[in-house]
Image: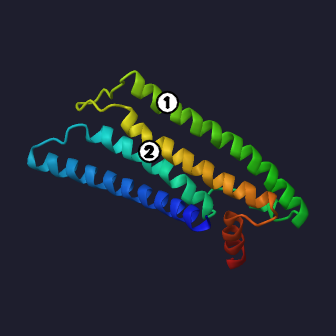
Amino acid sequence: MKNFKDSCYRLSGWLSGICILAITLLLLAQILGRLFGFIVPSAEDFAGFALAASTFFGLAYTFNEGGHIRVTLVIQRLSIGSRKVQEAIILTLALALTAFIAYASCYMVYESYIYEEVSYGYIPVPLWIPQLPVAIGALALVLAVLDAWVGSLRGKTPNYMKHEDELSFEE
């Protein structure tokens, strides 16, 4: 199961990187198009869709790797017992919040599909298509937070804390 979760986080990170590459290629095509006198239709729209996808795909990987911003100045001063209690409380709140975000994202995709909403750009795109990576990324983040929460309740140190501690000892 650990390999599956790690593969999901890694895949999520790779998909985020691919979306950033897509943004780069779209902007490059748009620049070259202006130089040679042609346009790339809806390039801004597709770049925006890729930006949203890269942001949400990157959340689970970044969380697992300890890349999210935390107030370690206070956290690292707590005793081990207090820190574990604090982490369990924070992860409980994070799990509730990320589950709500994932639910709302999935419901947004569902509504866009049911009501056949399309983008307003030059190329009309059914909105559920660019919204789907947002929902998938939010679900991956729920998996990552749930994984850390269950590990915390079992007394294990979550992955993000291991990476955080490694970074603090390097200084």
What residue is pinned by disc 1? 108
Q: Kindly identify the amino acid type of the residue bearing the numbered disc 1.
A: Met
Q: Quadrant of residue 80?
A: bottom right
Q: How busy is the neighbourhood of tag 1: few (under 14 within 10 Å), some, or many (20 plus)?
A: some
Depth order, front residue of 1/27 = 1
Label 1's element?
helix
Q: Quadrant of the C terminus?
A: bottom right
Residue positioned 61% across, 52% down in the render: 143
Depth order, front residue of 79/112 = 112
- Place of residue 91 in the rendered image (x, y in percent of width and height, measured from the top left): 74, 51
Which labelled disc corresponds to residue 133?
2
Q: How many marks?
A: 2
Residue positioned 50% across, 63% down in the render: 10
Depth order, front residue of 79/143 = 143
Q: Kindly identify the amino acid type of the residue bearing the numbered disc 2.
A: Pro
N-term-proximal mark, 1 vs 2: 1
